[in-house]
Every structure is written in C-alpha cells, then in structure tokens.
Image (spheres, rainbow, N blue to C red):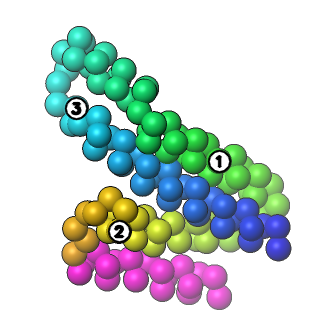
Amino acid sequence: MKSLAVIALIVVSGALGDIFLARGMKQVGSIDTLALKELLQIARRVLFSGFILLGIGCMAVAFFSLVTVLAWEKVSVVEPATSLSYVINTLGAKFYLKEEVDLARWIGTVLVTLGIACLCL
C-alpha cells in the first residue's frame, strides 16, 4: 500500500514538475543565442522564475520518491506505473497551459495508458 502511495506521488509531482517548467520557460522566452551576455540574462530570468523553481521542487520530490520506492519494489513494477504521468502531462498541457493537443496526441496518450494497463496485469 505504501508503494502505491509513493508511486502516485511520483506520477503527480513529476507531471506537475514538467508542466511548471514548461510554463516558466514560456515566460522566460526562447533561447536562440550563444552570446554570453544574453545567455547570462536568460539564466538570471530562469533563476528568478517562480514557476521554474516550483517545477524543480516538484521534480526533486519525484526523484527522491522514486529512489525511495525502488528500495521496496522491482523496477519492472515501478517504471510502468510512473508512465501514467503522460496522461497528466497531456491534460495539463491542454487545460492548464492552453496548448493545442491534436487527435493524434490524444490517441497516443490513450495507447500509452492501455499499454501500461497491460503491463500491470
């Protein structure tokens, strides 16, 4: 039971980390230069972005939770279960980040989910 709870924490915190990092980078803007001065300015914006810091925090929770649960469970059980984060990422992209998610991406998400269900049987 504790493994299931930690796996759920990994899925949710990992997906939220991805979503918050994406939102933060959209605010920072594209990185399309190799000029040192401009790269330092971009780095400063990244370091002071609340969404990026929140995303990094969520990813840290996911990482340390993964390390913990791997001490209890087989990797062949944990990794397929954590793949459910694809579903949360797609939903977050559509409804939180307001990204256009086309039919092919929805079908891919459903196929991944069905594949995970097959692995868990």
**Which residue does the numbered mark 2 point to in the structure image?**
95
> Could you say whether the residue bearing mark 2 is in a helix, strand or loop?
helix
**Sooner in the amino-acid sequence: mark 1 or mark 2:** 1
What residue is rendered at 24% in x and 12% in y?
A: 36
Q: In this rendering, which labeled residue sits more in front, label 1 or label 2? A: 2
Disc 1 versus disc 2: distance between alpha carbons? 23 Å
Residue 6 in which image quadrant: bottom right
Query: Toward the viewer: 51 or 76?
Result: 51
- Quadrant (top left/top right/bottom left/bottom right) for the C terminus: bottom right
Up-down: is 2 above or below 41? below
Query: Is 107 rendered above or below residue 80?
Result: below
Q: Amino acid at mark 3?
A: Ile
Position in image of residue 110 (x %, y %): 40, 83
Q: Secondary structure at mark 3?
A: loop
Residue 61's tag is 1
Residue at screen point 36% across, 48% down: 22
CA distance for labels 3 and 1: 27 Å
Amino acid type at mark 2: Phe
- Disc marking residue 72: none
Residue denoted by label 3: 31
Q: Position of residue 21 (x, y in %)?
A: 41, 45
Q: Which residues are magenta?
A: 103-121
Q: CA distance from mark 2 to mark 3?
A: 25 Å
**Residue drawn at the location 28% of the way across and 18% of the way down:** 41
Q: Earlier in the sequence, mark 2 or mark 3?
A: 3
| Local crowd size for mark 2, using a 10 Å CA cut-off: few (<14), some (14–19), many (≥20) | few
Question: Vertically, is 108 above or below 69?
Answer: below
Q: Nearer the viewer, residue 48 or 66?
A: 48
Left or right? Give the position of 98 relative to 5.
left
Closest to the observer: 16 or 118? 16
Query: Do we see residue 74 in this rendering?
Result: no
